[in-house]
Amino acid sequence: MPKSKFLPRGRKDRTAVLVDIRPTKSAKACDIFLQVRPGKDFELITILRALIKDQKVSEEAVAETGVSLEQCNDLVDRMKKAKFGCMFFGMGLSMTRGKHMNSAALLTLATEMNAFTKFVAMPMRGHGNVTGADVVMRWQTGYPFGITFNRGYPRYNPGEFSTVDVLVRGDTDAAFIIGADPGATMPQPAIDHLARIPTIVLDPHITHTSKLSRVHITTSVAGISAPGTAYRMDEIPLPLKPALKSPYPTDEEVVRRIKDAIAKKRFWMPEGEQMITAQI
Amino acid sequence: MTLTVVNNATCTFCGCVCDDIELHADEIKIHKAKKACVLGTAWFLNHTAERKYPDALIDGKEATLDEAIEAAATYLHEADMPLVYGMSNTTCEAQRECVALADLLGGLLDSHTSL
Ligand code: SF4
């Protein structure tokens, strides 16, 4: 871990706390490990929110989370004493009982910690440029994901407009998939629905999703044979420097061509036109 | 054979997006990815510039790019509730086009973040 002006001893100047349902390899790399009971994340976060404000919490409520009151108090103490705290969270929080309400609770905790010291929260990212997708959608629509344009303007509601839910309910009647392979990662009812409806895939490889799709278009690989920009997890944009030349077109070019082909057809609403026109 | 060296190349395999990778490549493949981690090295070395797959497939059969674009446009245009999803392994420039596409379609727009 880097040494810096304010943290001259690098890792030794930092405290890492891991919260998980079981001790993993990361637990050894951390200073403190808190084992939370599966599905009790929301409760634990809410207890922490109460404790930072010196509210009373009942022993039973704390005991249910699998973490002791002593551990909670110690954590709150350390958080308040920290000069700069960062909470990283992943799918273990956002995809278990409570889902996006868990993420919302954690973000609220981070917000409330700022009454005492500087605190931020950051989602842990898997593949590639997911952060870029958040940033671009926020820039263009005001929302980071789970968006619909079905009234002609963007609206946001995870759970209602998020992909897994839409697919499992069987709402959507066509899917355009780019830079992802839901056919390999999503729950089976969602995959079944993708196979039922016309699915279009843009990918450098023939993926699981390509195999159940009506249309697959091979594109070049971002960062290897396609130029562009990618966002780092902490929202720093970085230019890509492709080392190879691909025989395939880039994602950008193909999406633009599909969009242009659709623009030639009749607009879906009786009146009006596309809100976000080409940006430069 | 001389290899082209790309300095400070960016790896997009994981969210860290390291931007200090040194790539040694010929026309077809990358031979060395200095400073990349195990995952990053595997990612760089596994991709080639060969034509491994057909340009496009429609219903599992080989098709040209133009045909596939027209088919995609027709399917999406005919749908009442089209979904634009994914956008993780791609560039911001392509993501921007995706937002415009969803807007033009009056459809849904979502990324991996919702998972
Ligand atoms: S080099 Fe490794 S750590 Fe860095 S972005 Fe690539 S996969 Fe991630």
Image (cartoon, rainbow, N blue to C red):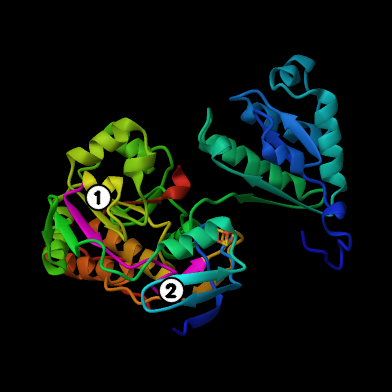
Q: Is residue A112 above or below residue B28?
A: above
Q: Is residue A252 above or below residue B3?
A: above
Q: Quadrant of residue A9?
A: bottom right
Q: Quadrant of residue A67?
A: top right
Residue A99: mark in rendering: none
- For label 2, the SS is strand
As for residue A265 lying within the magenta part, the answer is: no
At label 1, which amino acid type do we have?
Answer: Ser
Write down the chain letter for disc 1.
A
Quarter, ligand 1 = bottom right
- Magenta-tinted stretch: A213-230
Please, which residue is most extreme toward the front here? B1
Q: Residue at x 83, y 66 (%)?
A: A4
Q: Where is residue A198 in the image (x, y as percent from the top left)?
A: 17, 47
* Mark 2 lies on residue: A228
Which one is closest to the eye, mark 2 or mark 1? 1
**In this rendering, would A272 be left or right of B14?**
left
**Closest to the observer, A75 or B66:** B66
At label 2, which amino acid type do we have?
Answer: Gly
Residue A210: mark in rendering: 1
